Amino acid sequence: MTRNELQQHFKAQGTVVLPVIHVLDNEQAERNVRLACDGGAHGVFLINHDFPPEPFLPIIRQVRSVFPELWLGVNFLAVTGKDAFPVLGELERDGCPVNAYWADNARIDETHSPEDQPEAREIAAVREQSGWNGLYFGGTAFKKQREVAPEQYKTAARVASRWMDVVTTSGIATGHAAAQSKIVDIRAGCGDTALALASGVTPDNALHYAKAVDCFLVATGINVSGDFYNLDPDQLEQLLRVANAQHLIQHS
């Protein structure tokens, strides 16, 4: 997916903002999704940070039933697309469409050529067989995964662009901003492929990334201070303002 295609997909003028909700239960998930929608976010990602995928599925179904028009993405923590895509296909056949899947680890190996990627190829085959047709946000040089040497960031992104819709990278840990040099290299490697950034994005630093990054996946940077689970509407409003400001700067 190209940068322009991502913007068109979301009908966005600036950087796409997708709040990430660390799910606890139905009530907390619904409350935060409503805050995100009312605040003008382009959609949301739900993530099962505190429990395995199985109890997460009923919450996904409930959120979809309450918000049938919501752009909804999910991250099954510690699971790759090999396991996630069949589940997503089943959800879709059951009338619970999910618009996007984000994997922290897309199983890219930057030491091999873009075509010589057996794990990524296997995941792609499972995706095709699943019948699911949403967007794939694939973790590349991502926190808490196999470390990628900084001199390989550009190569990793170039390889990743072959295997996913949106190359997705991060800082070194949750709440830690990515080094500017890393984003410059990842952007260069992506070419015109869409790039998402997770972890460490805040209203205060977003403008530093907005020219290179097409989509912010953001949780703690717009949460209530000291609260891992609940969005702060004021922080979301500020981030959206900054994301749109990049569009205004580019067209001024």
Image (cartoon, rainbow, N blue to C red):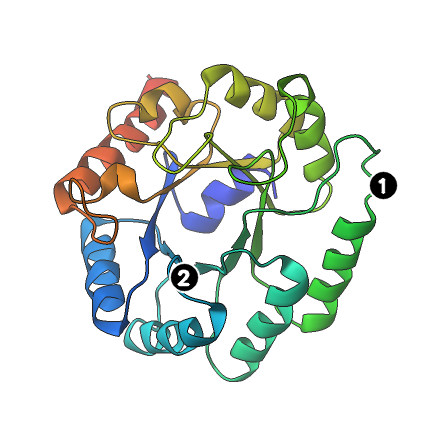
Among numbered discs 1 and 2, the one appearing first in the sequence: 2
Q: Is residue 180 above or below residue 46?
A: above
Q: What residue is pinned by disc 2?
A: 48
Mark 2 surroundings within 10 Å by alpha-carbon count, few (fewer than 14), some (14 through 19), many (20 or more): many
Residue that appears at 64% across and 66% down: 83
Identity, as a three-letter code, of the amino acid under mark 1? Glu
Residue type at mark 2: give it: Asn
Q: Nearer the viewer, mark 1 or mark 2?
A: 2
Q: Percent position (x, y) of residue 93? A: 56, 82
Residue drawn 50% across the image and 61% down it: 76
- Looking at the image, residue 204 sits to the left or right of residue 161; the answer is left
Indicate the secondary structure of the residue bearing disc 2. loop
Q: Is residue 32 left or right of residue 42?
A: left
Above or below, 15 against 10 in this view is: above
The residue drawn where x is 34% and y is 35% is 175
Q: Secondary structure at mark 1?
A: loop
Residue 115's disc is 1
Q: Is residue 230 visible?
A: yes
- The percent coordinates of residue 242 (x first, y second) are 26, 28
Q: Nearer the viewer, residue 209 or 21?
A: 21
**Where residue 96 sits in the image (x, y, percent)?**
46, 77
Give the position of the N terminus as an image quadrant.
top right
Report, in whole angstroms, how far the alpha carbon at label 1 lies from the one at label 2. Answer: 32 Å
Residue 239, given in percent of the width and then of the height, sits at: 25, 34
